[in-house]
Amino acid sequence: MKKLFYSLLVLAMAATTFTSCEDVPAPYNDPNNNGGGTTTEITPAGSGTEADPYNVAAALQKIKALAANVNSEPIYVKGKIVSIKSVETQTYGNATYYISDDGTAKNQLYIYQGYYLGNKKFTAEDQIKVGDEVVIYGPFVNYNGNTPETVGKGQTYIYSLNGKKDENGGGTTPSVEAKGDGTEASPYNVTAAIAKGTASNVYTKGFIVGYIYGKTAKDGARFSSDTCTVTSNVLIAATATEKDITKCMPVQLPANAVRTAVNLKDNKTHLGKEVLLYGEITKYYGQPGIKSVTYAEIDGKTAGTKPGAASDAILNETFATSLGKFTVANEVDLAAGTTVWQADTKYKCAKATAYINKVRVTSDSWLISPALDLSSVTKATLSFEQAGRYFGTVADEIKVLVSTDYNSGKPSTATWTPLTLSATVTNKDFTFVATTADLQAFVGKANVRIAFEYKSTTTTAGTWQLRNLIVK
């Protein structure tokens, strides 16, 4: 009986052992199991258009090919929400989250501070959820060269959410496709300029759709001209009927011929007309805008000084990388190693300042042109752009003068005549102001030199910037 008991016990244990082994995972992938442990790489697809958006794999490929911190043109990208980092509904109304092609955390794309459907702000945290299929529209950037993501602060938005283009399932008007490279032959349209974010010395073309009245673009945008009393700015867009402020660019109009020609107060029929502008793409009214406009074309007319039209110029100096053929002469001697005038390669201009090592220094420093031969011309004009701030009395501290008997040494050894300028610096910020001066009084003479005189004291030492100087 005891032997029979032990035999039955051994058989029971063996049966249990074999049954348990069936539940232990195999230490390798079963080649007959199609779902076992392999990951399928997703092939990049799409063209980035509304009809054929990039998948995430294609978008990552495109964005990684960008130079660091350079914005792409606006594109459409389709994916599934993997995780949501934040949905801000109180002030900015944007959301930050990740998307991928298959909804997993592999090969994610970072959607940073994007808006909701229809380019509207988020009003509730549950407007999106993990697993939602979205089409994102807007510019992307390879942040610091290692993080592909959307350009933030509401410059991108959800174009489609689970197949719907707005909360009611209807369609929204997509943005105009970005075009242009910023040249005269191919100016940026407004969509491309907004995506660019920042750029100097570029052409932008758009339609005048209104102006800003007040301190903010959101509350002060006026899409009309009949009651306009503002001359300092206009709004331009990619279409003549645009009324979405996020698709518009505010344009700061300098106090010169450009303002006279473009502003809506004095030119109410300009509403809806196309305008070509040359200037700087930068933040204005808290969003991408245009400042330092030196040239404009509208309604068949031009205003300001056309850049690049200097092939026949007597003198053409941008100061972008050096002071060129200009020389510096100090009427007041400076300490060894101290320089007032220098080329500022970051801001691409000539800069004068006697605020050195956090100390204001007394100076009288001149930036003087090479000798110009005006003996064979019948007309000559000086044009340049200038910016300046932190001066006490601008007229006493910066001047532009001309001499016909200066050769070298201290400027006081020659006779200098002050020029009458069309404009001066704002002394409030570093907005460049287009400036011209008539040189007719010096036509017919051969040793003409133009000088920019900068003065400072131990109590006042401003900063003066010059660029794009032309004599023709």
Image (cartoon, rainbow, N blue to C red):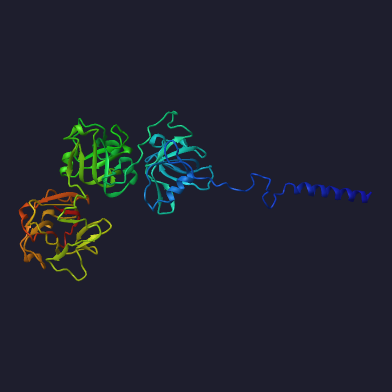
* Residue at (9% x, 66% y) in the render: 407
Left or right of residue 28, residue 456 in this image: left
Residue 462, percent across and down?
18, 57
Q: Quadrant of residue 353?
A: bottom left
Residue 167 position, x and y percent, is: 44, 30
Pick out the residue farthest to the bottom: 336
**Residue lying furthest right:** 1
Seen in the image, is 408 located left or right of residue 62?
Answer: left
Q: Nearer the viewer, residue 354 or 254?
A: 254
Q: Residue at x 14, y 69 (%)?
A: 333
Q: Is residue 443 left or right of residue 257?
A: left
The quadrant in which residue 256 appears is top left
Q: In the image, residue 41 lies at what x, y percent?
A: 55, 47
Q: Identify the residue at horizontal 86%, vertical 50% (top origin).
A: 10
Location of residue 83 in the rendering, given as x and y in whole percent from the top left corner: 50, 43
In-front residue for pair 269/184:
184
Q: Can residue 120 be seen from the camera position used here?
A: no
